[in-house]
């Protein structure tokens, strides 16, 4: 039989796990100080910005709308539609490289100062928890057990805050108009939306009420990437080992000699850490760079009359006494990549037209011989109206080759931001084909400035005795003419 001691790890595996594998609940002690004051002010600013952003309109559109259902993304006045995959991909890569740059320069400053997980956990949920259940005592004492009603009240307030958060979060995906409609009508009128809302609230409760700091430690991939993105010149929260060690409560050692270390091993930096680590063990993946340990240690040093900064924002190189500048290849290469990407995005945006048009060949027979010596090709035209107003697109042949084009509706009316695909039958005289090919051009216009010519290759009989469906080499059905996204 395997005993538990055999399974027990030599050291702590995760800061949120006890050695026996049970959850180690963290109740970090709040340490007031310069960094906490700044972080708190910034966090409140972010909370207000996060709440108000869905209501802000820019150029008649929401400032940010991530409409996944209709595959439409609006960012700062520009609308990304499914035809903008390249633009969206370039923008996302630019954001990613920006994060690389930010991390190379300032470590996990995003995690500690701006990530919604940290902002809401540390400046909304934990303060509520402290309000109902008290703060952690000095010297690492756990909170005293609290009355049941206090716990119930805490979870009731958590639920209210989670509902507010879920509504705010969803406003980014459905818009404030839909949200207002849902909130003011019965759930039976919009059951799916109600379930999504309830599930999002449940997720918030799970995250902030139960999973908490484990999101940063286990679930977030950014923490894992940290070791690849940081270098010795990145700004991190560090403990000055040279100054601090050997640590101990007594200033004099047992043989009467002065202790060299400034760290008095009060453990305040550990008690205050929201991810439960000891910064004195060096840079760890769990460190979110929040500087709570800096604020915890500063008054201890002040009280003892020792220099501030035993724990401080610094770089690994500076801590090791290296005199090096902050310039290195990655902080030059990342901005250069961002510049190239930004130029590409700006160029693509500047040549974009108000509609995307794609001409596709229909499936089935490439052409049909008609009475009167005519040949027809069956196509589909897909038009995306990028305007903020409805538009009607007229499709006409250019030149005199085409006998007629047949559509169920022409001009094609399309609502703002919507796409429509309609069948187009193009009829040309058989004599227009050379070696089974006839090149024509279609002109699409909306009467409000949008105009576009689309070249189109029609297929037909290659000889005078051709049958109705054979013809020249038959390309697969698919796109045959395209001028989208310009
Ligand atoms: S708060 Fe400062 S003095 Fe206290 S244990 Fe941490 S590093 Fe040492
Ligand atoms: S070690 Fe310090 S900076 Fe890092 S997470 Fe803990 S308290 Fe924040």
Image (tube, grey):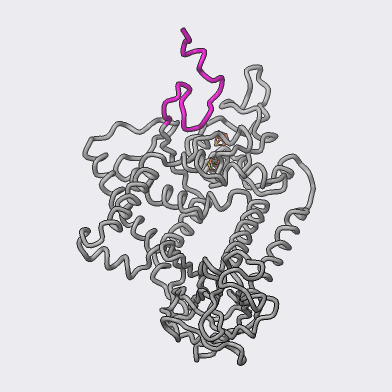
Nearer to us in this view, 175 or 43: 175
Quadrant including the C terminus: bottom right
**Where is residue 116 drawn, in percent x and y?**
46, 53
Q: Residue at x 26, y 61 (%)?
A: 190
Nearer to us in this view, 224 or 408: 408
Above or below, 456 relative to 254: below
Q: Residue at x 70, y 42 (%)?
A: 316
* Figure quadrant of residue 338: bottom right
Q: Residue at x 49, y 39 (%)?
A: 275
- Was residue 327 drawn as part of the magenta stretch in this picture? no
**Where is residue 481 drawn, in percent x and y?**
61, 75
Task: State the residue lying farthest toward the front.
Answer: 465
Q: How many marks do you count on the picture?
A: 0
Nearer to us in this view, 177 or 274: 177
Q: Residue at x 67, y 44 (%)?
A: 228
* Figure quadrant of residue 428: bottom right
Side (left or right) of 458 relative to 415: right
**Where is residue 479 drawn, in percent x and y?**
59, 69
Quadrant of the picture in which ligand 1 is shown: top right
Above or below, 424 relative to 73: below
- Was residue 7 drawn as part of the magenta stretch in this picture? yes
**Where is residue 367 drawn, in percent x and y?**
56, 73
Residue 349 visible, this orientation:
no
Give the main secondary structure, helix, strand or loop, of the magenta stretch: loop
Residue 109 visible, this orientation:
yes
Provide the residue span drawn in magenta: 1-24
């Amino acid at each position: 039989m395997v005993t538990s001691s055999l399974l027990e790890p030599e050291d702590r595996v995760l800061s949120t796990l006890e050695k026996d594998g049970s959850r180690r609940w963290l109740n970090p002690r709040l340490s007031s100080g310069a960094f906490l004051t700044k972080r708190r002010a910034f966090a409140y600013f972010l909370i207000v910005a996060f709440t108000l952003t869905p209501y802000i309109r820019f150029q008649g559109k929401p400032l940010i709308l991530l409409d996944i259902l209709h595959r439409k993304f609006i960012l700062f006045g520009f609308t990304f539609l499914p035809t903008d995959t390249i633009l969206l991909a370039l923008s996302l890569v630019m954001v990613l490289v920006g994060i690389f740059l930010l991390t190379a320069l300032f470590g996990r400053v995003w995690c500690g100062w701006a990530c919604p997980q940290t902002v809401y956990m540390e400046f909304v949920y934990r303060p509520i928890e402290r309000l109902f259940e008290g703060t952690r005592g000095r010297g690492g004492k756990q909170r005293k057990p609290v009355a049941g009603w206090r716990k119930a009240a805490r979870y009731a307030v958590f639920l209210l805050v989670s509902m507010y958060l879920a509504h705010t979060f969803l406003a980014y995906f459905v818009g404030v108009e839909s949200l207002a409609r849902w909130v003011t009508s019965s759930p039976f009128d919009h059951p799916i939306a109600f379930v999504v809302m309830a599930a999002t609230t449940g997720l918030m409760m799970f995250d902030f009420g139960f999973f908490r700091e484990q999101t940063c430690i286990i679930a977030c991939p950014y923490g894992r990437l940290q070791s690849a993105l940081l270098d010795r010149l990145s700004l991190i929260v560090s403990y000055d080992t040279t100054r601090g060690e050997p640590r101990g409560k007594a200033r004099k050692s047992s043989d009467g000699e002065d202790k060299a270390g400034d760290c008095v091993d009060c453990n305040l930096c550990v008690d205050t850490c929201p991810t439960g680590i000891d910064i004195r063990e060096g840079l760890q993946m769990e460190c979110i760079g929040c500087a709570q340990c800096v604020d915890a240690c500063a008054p201890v040093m002040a009280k003892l009359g020792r220099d501030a900064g035993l724990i401080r924002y610094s770089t690994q190189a500076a801590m090791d006494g290296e005199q090096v500048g902050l310039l290195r290849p990655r902080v030059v290469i990342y901005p250069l990549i961002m510049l190239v990407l930004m130029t590409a995005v700006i160029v693509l945006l500047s040549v974009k037209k108000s509609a995307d048009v794609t001409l596709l060949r229909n499936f089935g027979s490439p052409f049909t011989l008609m009475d009167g010596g005519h040949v027809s090709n069956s196509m589909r035209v897909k038009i995306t109206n990028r305007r903020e107003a409805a538009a009607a697109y007229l499709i006409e042949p250019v030149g005199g080759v085409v006998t007629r084009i047949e559509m169920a509706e022409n001009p094609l009316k399309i609502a703002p931001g919507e796409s429509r695909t309609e069948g187009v039958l193009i009829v040309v005289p058989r004599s227009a084909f050379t070696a089974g090919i006839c090149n024509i051009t279609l002109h699409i216009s909306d009467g409000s400035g949008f105009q576009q010519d689309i070249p189109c290759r029609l297929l037909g009989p290659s000889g005078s005795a051709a049958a109705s469906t054979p013809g020249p080499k038959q390309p697969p059905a698919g796109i045959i003419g395209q001028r989208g996204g310009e």
